[in-house]
Image (cartoon, rainbow, N blue to C red):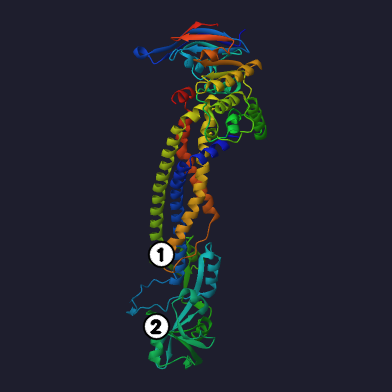
């Protein structure tokens, strides 16, 4: 059985005359350890799909299952726990907390976990090491470059070793050299076993994935390269 | 890294907002502390002054007769025939429930004697107790020994006696040890001598005509003391000189009520400052809260972060408010206390109270902003950026 299963997913915003269908009866599966890109034009429904996959946006109908867990049958707080344990987020604009240092930002997903402060620090430093940011632990986000911010965001996404990494336009704000470094990093994480779903506009970035899901007008129009 | 660290670091980042909340709460707490300290200090001050007013409870023998004197003018009917009080009964006053509030007890014995062809009222008093009961007394001379007397100023003038003059009362040779400076009261027309001597001269050993009590009534109702004394001295009528004590205490009670009212209003304003500032802070932090929720912070975690921030700042406001309030009271006492600054001491109780009050008000005012923050939907919060 597939690791991630979306069955007949639909999402409608608003109601009656003002209703907008963002997703229409979407079905797809992702195997454990896959690297999948989700492509599509602006407004095609990529972000809605990613938010549903991220357990943050309940679909209007359909079912979304990860590792045998029917995610939207979980209560709100259980779904929060699910996000913490199963999903690492890499947001489009990094979304680092400005008053926390690099290492503290990376430690954030561990904040509510019952682990000693020292251990949290060690795990965060290991994650920073993986994204080649060792030595910049105590800097503030405002003191590092865009590429480094992206690496911090990736380190934060992997610090608690979640099985799934969701990335929303992770290279949207980066130059081409940094973009390729970051994509190489995603590829390495995937090779180490992470299941990655990445939303991107860029054909070049999508090419790093093993499979592409193309979305248009809220419908899945192509499931493979 | 834990929720406390996040709360603390956020406060450090938003210093202006944190200072605004701190100031709002600290002003409220300092006002409450200042008012409470001020009322306490003034109560202390008034009690201290009440001691200077002397006796505020009178113990006289029970009688059916009505007094026929007014303002020192006697129209007859003075009841010297009435039963005297036994001196030993007065000792029991030291064992009443509010005995600690008895600052001074002055038994007095009266009798009419002939001196230098004049009929004069002789009073036997306890000169020790008189310093508390009649602090306005000033004697030209010394306190009399066993065979000495002190003359009221008018008595000395009428009898033509001075300090050191010999005087014979009921065949007993005595010396005028001093003359009382004019008091404007009946005391100016009396001869005073030690209680034991007077009792011997008047043949009233073990008896007293009346007694005066100086009661400190900070912690006790004067009426309760009157009742307690009546119970232990059954043959006597015990009366409170109500107007002195009650008038002052009632004025203070009114001021207390007023100060509580002001405190509530100031605290309400302080809590509104906290509420509005925290609401603004929560709205500004939509992105941050969205991230927290997205990466696995439960609603309760977000709620706790906001309350921790409020708790930190409120505790600081409590301490700052206490220090400011205490300093304000110190300053105010210089203006309001006639003696130029009644003593006011730091109180651990009040420090604890100020801290608890600040934290309570701060947390209560932050509950709604914390609730709103915790209810923030992560998807909406991140899309709203």
| Above-or-below relation of A91 to B193 | above
SS at mark 1 in the image: helix
Instruction: Report x, y in % for residue B370.
Output: 48, 34
Residue B178 appears in the figure:
yes
On the image, which quarter does residue A77 sit in?
A: top right
Tag on residue B335? 1
The one of B316 and B211 positioned closer to us in this rendering: B316
Helix, strand or loop for disc 2: loop
Q: Residues within 10 Å of mark 2 (few under 14, many from 20)?
A: some
- Residue A54, position in %: x, y? 53, 18
Q: CA distance from mark 2 to mark 1?
A: 32 Å
Which badge, 2 or 1, comes first in the chain's sequence? 2
Q: Residue at x 47, y 54 (%)?
A: B324
> For mark 2, what is the residue?
B182
In the displayed structure, would residue B2 be above or below residue B159?
above
Q: Residue B252 in the image: state x and y as whole percent.
A: 40, 59
Q: Is residue B103 above or below residue A69?
A: below
Q: Is residue B54 visible?
A: no
Residue depicted at 50% across the width and 68% down the height:
B233
Residue extending furthest toward the front: A177
């Amino acid at each position: 059985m597939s690791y991630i299963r979306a069955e007949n997913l639909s999402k409608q915003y608003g109601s009656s005359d003002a209703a907008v269908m963002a997703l229409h009866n979407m079905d797809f599966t992702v195997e454990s350890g896959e690297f999948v890109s989700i492509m599509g034009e602006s407004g095609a429904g990529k972000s809605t799909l990613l938010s549903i996959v991220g357990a943050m946006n309940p679909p209007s109908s359909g079912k979304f299952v990860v590792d045998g867990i029917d995610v939207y049958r979980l209560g709100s707080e259980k779904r929060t726990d699910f996000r913490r344990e199963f999903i690492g987020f890499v947001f489009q604009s990094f979304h680092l907390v400005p008053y926390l240092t690099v290492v503290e930002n990376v430690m954030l997903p561990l904040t509510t976990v019952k682990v000693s402060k020292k251990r949290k620090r060690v795990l965060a430093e290991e994650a920073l090491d993986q994204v080649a940011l060792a030595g910049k632990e105590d800097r503030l986000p405002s003191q590092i470059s865009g590429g480094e911010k992206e690496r911090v965001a990736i380190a934060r996404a992997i610090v608690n070793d979640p099985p799934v990494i969701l990335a929303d336009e992770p290279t949207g704000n980066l130059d081409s050299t940094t973009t390729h470094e970051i994509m190489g990093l995603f590829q390495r994480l995937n090779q180490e076993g992470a299941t990655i779903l990445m939303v991107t506009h860029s054909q070049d970035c999508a090419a790093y994935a093993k499979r592409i899901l193309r979305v248009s007008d809220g419908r899945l129009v192509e499931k493979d390269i | 890294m834990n929720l406390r660290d996040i709360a603390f670091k956020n406060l450090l980042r938003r210093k202006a907002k944190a200072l605004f909340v701190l100031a709002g709460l600290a002003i409220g707490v300092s006002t409450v502390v200042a008012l409470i300290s001020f009322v306490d200090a003034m109560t202390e001050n008034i009690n201290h002054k009440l001691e200077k007013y002397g006796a505020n409870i009178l113990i006289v023998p029970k009688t059916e007769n009505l007094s026929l004197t007014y303002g020192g003018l006697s129209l007859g009917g003075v009841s010297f025939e009435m039963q005297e009080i036994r001196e030993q009964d007065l000792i029991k006053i030291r064992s009443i429930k509010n005995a600690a509030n008895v600052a001074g007890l002055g038994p007095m014995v009266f009798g009419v004697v002939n001196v230098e062809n004049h009929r004069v009222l002789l009073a036997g008093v306890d000169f020790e107790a008189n310093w508390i009961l009649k602090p306005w007394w000033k004697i030209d001379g010394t306190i009399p020994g066993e065979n000495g007397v002190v003359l009221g100023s008018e008595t000395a003038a009428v009898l033509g006696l001075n300090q050191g003059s010999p005087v014979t009362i009921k065949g007993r040779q005595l010396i005028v040890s001093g003359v009382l400076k004019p008091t404007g009261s009946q005391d100016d027309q009396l001869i005073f001598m030690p209680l034991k001597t007077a009792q011997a001269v008047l043949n009233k050993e073990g008896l007293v005509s009346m007694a005066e009590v100086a009661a400190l009534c900070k912690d006790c109702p004067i009426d309760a003391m009157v009742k307690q004394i009546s119970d232990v001295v059954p043959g006597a009528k015990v009366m409170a000189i109500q107007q002195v004590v009650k008038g002052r205490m009632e004025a203070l009670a009114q001021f207390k009520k007023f100060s509580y009212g002001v405190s509530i209003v100031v605290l309400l304003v302080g809590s509104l400052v906290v509420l509005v500032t925290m609401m603004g802070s929560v709205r500004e932090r939509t992105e941050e809260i969205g991230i927290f929720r997205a990466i696995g912070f439960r609603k309760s975690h977000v709620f706790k972060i906001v309350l921790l921030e409020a708790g930190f700042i409120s505790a600081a406001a409590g301490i700052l408010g206490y220090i400011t309030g205490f300093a304000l009271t110190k300053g105010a006492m210089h203006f309001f206390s006639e003696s130029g600054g009644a003593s006011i001491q730091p109180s651990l109780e009040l420090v604890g109270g100020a801290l608890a009050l600040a934290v309570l008000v701060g947390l209560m005012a932050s509950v709604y902003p914390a609730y709103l923050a915790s209810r923030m939907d992560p998807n909406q919060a991140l899309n709203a950026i």
